[in-house]
Amino acid sequence: MNLANFETMDPVMLMSIVNMKLRDDFGGDLDKLVAYFDIDRSALETKLATAGFDFLAEAGQFR
């Protein structure tokens, strides 16, 4: 799944995909995920915040 078009995605679906990728491929490291997909971390966090999701570093996922 390519996250290059994350800005146009439904935020709930995006959260699900990002959390799956964080869990399965990046060990919960958001910096590694955004670097791999070459996306802006702040923009991703802002998009997910519109649906009430914040990144919890200790859990390695958005909730």
Image (cartoon, grey):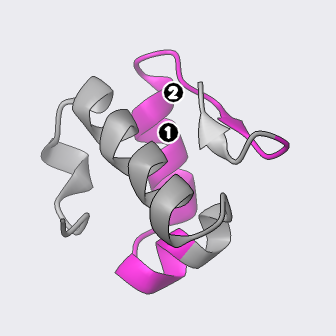
Q: State which region is magenta.
A: 33-58
Residue marked by disc 1: 46
What's the residue at 41%, 17% (across, down)? 51
Secondary element at tag 1: helix
Secondary element at tag 2: helix
Residue marked by disc 2: 49
- Looking at the picture, tell me which residue is in the foreground, 57 or 4: 57
Q: Is residue 27 left or right of residue 47?
A: right
What's the residue at 57%, 70% (across, down)? 26
What's the residue at 44%, 33% (across, down)? 48
Above or below 62: residue 27: below
- Looking at the picture, tell me which residue is in the foreground, 21 or 42: 21
What's the residue at 76%, 39% (across, down)? 59
**For residue 55: magenta?**
yes
| Amino acid of disc 1 | Thr
Circles 2 and 1: CB atoms closer than 8 Å: yes
| Amino acid of disc 2 | Ala
Query: Could you tell me how far apart the alpha carbons at marks 2 and 1 are, in whole angstroms?
Result: 5 Å
Q: Quadrant of residue 29?
A: bottom right
Where does the image place residue 58, in percent across and percent down from the top left?
85, 43
Q: Is residue 8 left or right of residue 61?
A: left
**Is there any visible trace of residue 38 in the rendered image?**
no
The quarter of the image holding the N terminus is: bottom left
What is the residue that sits farthest to the right in this orientation? 58
Where does the image place residue 13, in percent across and percent down from the top left?
24, 32
Label annotation for residue 6: none
Above or below 25: residue 23: above
**For residue 53: magenta?**
yes
Where does the image place residue 8, in percent across and percent down from the top left?
14, 44
Q: Is residue 44 left or right of residue 62?
A: left
Q: Is residue 59 left or right of residue 25?
A: right
